[in-house]
């Protein structure tokens, strides 16, 4: 059976921190599904299709990475895809507290799915999508914070 992991998030936008987590997790799994969550309550800067396209461009040459959208509970998506692992990145102690609670709740909902945490590389610790999104909205240069293959201007409306 394949060791399949789901890396869920809104990825609005996908950052170099996200990219690093996926690249570092590749040796651990046979397949990683980057699951772009669709939440109609959230005001996203980029559409789900744009976010999927961004991420597919980043991992175009990596056959072990798939990119899909999902709605609803992440553990239900994992079950649907036959994934036994949830991959999460941790930047700060605040992330840990939130992710620990989420991981424990997911374990109650889906005992067969393990949550795997990877610590963010030190140089990526301050980078998060909210700050990068604000830089983009204010007309700043977000290129140092997103993967090289993403030209944000190609995705702005």
Image: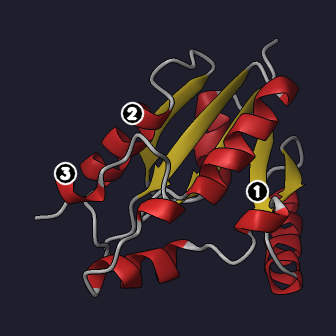
Residue at 89%, 83% in the rendered image: 93
Q: Residue 112: which numbered mark, if any?
A: none
Q: Is residue 150 above or below residue 102?
A: above
The quarter of the picture where the N terminus appears is top right
Residue at 45%, 49% in the rendered image: 70
Q: Secondary structure at mark 1?
A: strand
- Disc 1 vs disc 3: Cβ atoms closer than 8 Å? no
Q: Residue 154: which numbered mark, if any?
A: 3
- First-in-chain label (1 vs 3): 1
Q: Is residue 81 above or below residue 20?
A: above
Q: Residue 88: which numbered mark, if any?
A: 1
Q: Tell me: 62 left or right of 151.
A: right
The quarter of the picture where the C terminus appears is bottom left
Residue 62, how many percent across, how many down?
57, 20
Residue at 69%, 78% in the rendered image: 126
CA–CA distance between discs 1 and 3? 28 Å
- Disc 2 target residue: 57
- First-in-chain label (2 vs 3): 2
Q: Tell me: 76 left or right of 135.
A: right
CA–CA distance between discs 2 and 3? 12 Å
Residue 108, how many percent across, how many down?
87, 61
Q: Nearer the viewer, residue 108 or 41?
A: 41
């Amino acid at each position: 059976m394949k060791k399949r992991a789901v890396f869920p998030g809104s990825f609005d936008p996908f950052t170099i921190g996200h990219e690093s987590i996926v690249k570092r997790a590749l040796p651990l799994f046979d397949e990683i599904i980057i699951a772009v969550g669709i939440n109609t309550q959230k005001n996203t800067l980029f559409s789900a299709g744009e976010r999927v396209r961004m991420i597919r461009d980043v991992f175009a040459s990596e056959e072990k990475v798939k990119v899909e959208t999902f709605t609803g509970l992440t553990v239900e998506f994992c079950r649907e895809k036959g994934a036994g692992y949830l991959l999460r990145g941790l930047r700060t102690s605040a992330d840990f507290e939130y992710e620990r609670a989420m991981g424990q709740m997911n374990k109650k909902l889906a005992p067969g799915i393990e949550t795997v945490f990877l610590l963010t590389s030190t140089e990526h610790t301050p980078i998060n999508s909210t700050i990068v999104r604000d830089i983009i909205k204010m007309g700043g240069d977000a290129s140092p914070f997103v993967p090289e293959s993403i030209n944000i201007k190609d995705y702005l409306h």
